[in-house]
Image: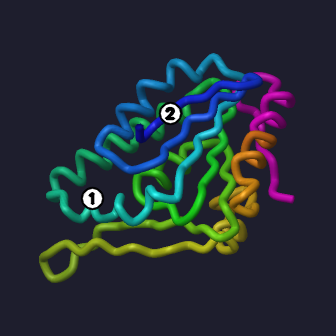
Amino acid sequence: MAVSLDVSGGIAVVRIDEPSDTVLPDVRALLPLVAGAGAVVLMVGSSSAASGIKRLVRRSAAEREALAASVRRVRDELADLPVPVVAAIDGNASGEAVELAMGCDLRVLASDGGLGRVTCDRVSGGQVLVARRVTAEEALRTGLVDRVVPSASLLRAAVELANECKSTQAGRKSCRIVAP
């Protein structure tokens, strides 16, 4: 299964383990279920990177536009949840995974990972997909992520951050924690 849900101690952990055409509808279907939790952790697995880009390349321009609109809708719904949402990003995530993570309040990235940004540039009347990797250090320095931790402690760090947000929350999504 590409998307799974586990709720423990008031924290809902949504895991995206592999890219598939059902990730966005699956995540969207879980959002009403996690809205009642104290906080949410969105765990993006390392397998979402390369194959996600390959799937994107195989799509037509119209399909890419439709996918981008769908990703934006789910990202915005994630951002609109009434509880703090923390992304835990393992490995080198890109595409849909990174876009969903950017909709989270806070982001924790594995120290050996990075973020991939794919853009579609127009060149000489055609379109070219361009990918750029942002290292964990650069992502932290530029504010794309709030913390960088070893991969082995990624989920634990994200859950701890979610618990901090949950316990300090005085109203709707008030938690903003600066990287240590």
Tell me, yes or no, whether the highlighted magenta stretch contains residue 179.
yes
Q: Are there few (<14), some (14-19), or many (20+) residues within 10 Å of tag 1? A: some
Residue at screen point 46% across, 58% down: 47
As helix, strand or loop, the secondary structure at mark 2 comes to strand
* Mark 2 and mark 1 residues within 8 Å of each other at the beta carbon: no
Residue 118, given in percent of the width and then of the height, sits at 38, 66
Q: How many marks?
A: 2
Q: Residue at x 54, y 19 (%)?
A: 33
Which of the marked residues, 2 or 1, is nearer the chain's N terminus? 2
Looking at the image, which residue is at 82% across and 24% down? Answer: 170
Three-letter amino acid code at disc 1? Arg
Q: Which residue is mark 2?
A: 4
Quarter holding residue 127? bottom left
What is the secondary structure assignment of the residue under circle 1?
A: helix
- Which portion, as a residue range, is magenta? 162-180
Q: Quadrant of residue 117?
A: bottom left
Q: In the image, is 163 to the left or to the right of 121?
A: right
Residue at the spot 33% in from the left edge and 46% down from the top edge: 20
Location of the N terminus (image quadrant): top left
* Residue at image mark 1: 55
Q: Amino acid at mark 2?
A: Ser
Residue 37 in the image: state x and y as whole percent.
67, 21
Image x and y of residue 57, in percent: 24, 65
